[in-house]
Amino acid sequence: MSDIRIHISNKTYVLAHDTAQFHHAIADLDFIVHPHQFVCLVGPSGCGKTTLLNMIAGLDQHYQGRIDMGQTDKVPSIGYVFQNPRLLPWLSVRQNIEVVFAHTPPTRLIDSLLDSMQLRDAQHQYPERLSLGMQRRVAIIRAFAINPDILLMDEPFVSLDAPTARQVRSLLYSLWLQRPHTVLFVTHDLREAIALADRLIFLSPSPMRVLSDIAVSIARDQRHEESRIELFREQLLQNHPEINGLL
Ligand SMILES: Nc1ncnc2c1ncn2[C@@H]1O[C@H](COP(=O)(O)OP(=O)(O)OP(=O)(O)O)[C@@H](O)[C@H]1O
């Protein structure tokens, strides 16, 4: 696995109600993601974060620029956890995970992921019986199960209550430590970003570009300490006036 290079020189949306007008979503966005890095993208609502993830996932190809996954011999595999867990209601938890495999699903891997996300007992339940936090955990397992070259996560804990968000975040973090993947994780929550990331990329309002690219220096085994996270956050806001008022 090599670096992922993202250079978007221009992304515009033509407006549906008036095709002569357009919205300039992204301009000169440039950054590199190193293998197995956990990168959080932080920016104001509507700045273009989901647009960028969709472009990386290949769901939106209408832009000028280049996204280079560094692989010429095979199409990179991409895991995508959307804001909405997008589970199929007629399939059980386990079947919702197995559905991503074209051939025989890897039983032991799925068992291990269900254990990591504390969902083994719920594996035969259907989505309507699950809490939102459980549904989000299933979506995370489904994305990890294919062992993707890059894992895209679009505010996966949005609209969870604070204790549930903390629980799912901590499960995700432990899973990622066991199986370190390259992650691009979108969030509005600066404390969440600091608790998870190797690197924080702050994005401007549209047209979106990189405002700051900051390494998180807190040791991995101290990320559960809220006082460490808060201290880092305060220093960050003090030392980087450009990100004040962004969120
Ligand atoms: N299909 C579309 N047509 C026109 N404009 C669009 C379209 N999709 C998104 N936009 C606009 O592009 C901008 C970026 O949207 P996007 O959803 O990528 O932002 P975001 O940063 O992910 O927002 P949020 O944090 O609120 O989820 C917004 O102004 C949005 O209205």
Image: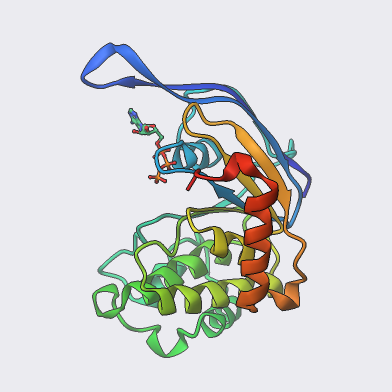
Q: Is residue 244 visible?
A: yes
Q: Position of residue 173 (x, y in %)?
A: 61, 72
The residue sitting at 26% across, 67% down in the picture is 89
* Near-viewer residue (79 or 29): 29
**Image quadrant in which you'd find residue 191:** bottom right
Please, which residue is most extreme toward the top here? 20
Q: Is residue 6 visible?
A: no
The residue sitting at 51% across, 70% down in the picture is 141
* Near-viewer residue (126 or 53): 53
Ligand 1 - quadrant of the structure image = top left
Please, which residue is most extreme toward the bottom here? 121
* Near-viewer residue (198 or 230): 230
Q: Position of residue 238 (x, y in %)?
A: 66, 51
Picture layout, residue 155 above or below residue 139: above
Please, which residue is most extreme toward the front here? 238
Q: Position of residue 217 (x, y in %)?
A: 77, 62
- How is the rendered protein coloured? rainbow
In this image, 225 relative to 122: left or right? right
Q: Position of residue 100 (x, y in %)?
A: 47, 61
Query: How many discs appear?
Result: 0
The residue sitting at 38% across, 74% down in the picture is 133
Picture layout, residue 39 above or below residue 167: above
**Image quadrant in which you'd find residue 222:** bottom right
